[in-house]
Image (tube, helix red, strand yellow):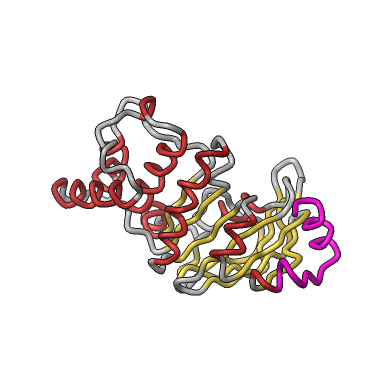
Amino acid sequence: MLHAHRVDKVFDNGCRALSQVSVTLRRGEVVVIVGPSGSGKSTFLRTLNRLESISAGRIELEGIDIHARSTNVNRLRERVGMVFQGFNLFPHKTALQNVMLAPLKVARRPRAEVEQQARGLLAKVGLAERMDHYPAQLSGGQQQRVAIARALCMQPQIMLFDEPTSALDPEMVGEVLEVMKSLARDGMTMVVVTHEMGFAREVADRVLFMADGLLLAEDTPDGFFNRPAHPRLRQFLSQIL
């Protein structure tokens, strides 16, 4: 479904963030990317919906070159949803209004259709009773669940998650991970950058390990955690598990 081939990213200051990264993602698959801070995980994730440019290589979504000049970025991001560390909700709009905004303004879908879908998605993420609340009236976990519903309301084919629980208090992490597990059970194709190793063990079809801009290892959760082959991965796991 999505293929990244020998992707390089060099920033203007000469810093090389990615070097020859190649990944293939199949429909319905959940891929989790882990690694130390500064390893290039989030940079790579952002190249998958063109929030970050690439210096070399190629990324294709069902045969469409994501980074070609002719590719419509807005149409691309309808197909590739993203949830960030920060919630990025509009403070002056309710949860329901936040979820409805992009389908109405970007996709220009009918209001009645969008509202029905938005209400259903907010109920799906456990916020049926909070639809008319403003972000300041919601906990961090609730705000992140609104952000997930907002991304889903664009009807994406793939969901990207960039450390979606890192800004949350520990007691709120579980409620967001439960929503993500539910999406995985429903067959959503997902790429998740996270430090939550329990989630990687339980939900991932494959776990990828990045360090210093390189993709050093990928395996099933069983092989990744129980039989790590790469010495840098073994060092990483010894420090966090």
Residue 171 or residue 85, whichever sits in front: 171
Quick check: is 238 in the magenta stretch? yes
Q: How many numbered callouts?
A: 0
Q: Position of residue 117 (x, y in %)?
A: 23, 52
Q: Residue at x 66, y 63 (%)?
A: 7
Any magenta on residue 61? Answer: no
Q: Nearer the viewer, residue 154 or 180?
A: 180
Q: Is residue 115 left or right of residue 64?
A: left
In the figure, 36 relative to 96: above or below? Answer: below
For the point 23% across and 47% down, which residue is it?
A: 119
Looking at this rendering, what residue extends furthest in the front direction? Answer: 171
Which quadrant, please, contains the C terminus? Answer: bottom right
Q: Position of residue 27 (x, y in %)?
A: 45, 73
Task: State which region is magenta.
Answer: 223-241
The residue drawn where x is 40% and y is 43% is 147
The x, y position of residue 43, in whole percent, is 63, 50
Which residue: 37% across, 42% down? 146
**Location of residue 218 in the rendering, given as x and y in whole percent from the top left corner:** 69, 70
Residue at the left extreme of this rendering? 112
Prevailing secondary structure class for the magenta stretch in the rendered image: helix
The quarter of the picture where residue 228 lies is bottom right
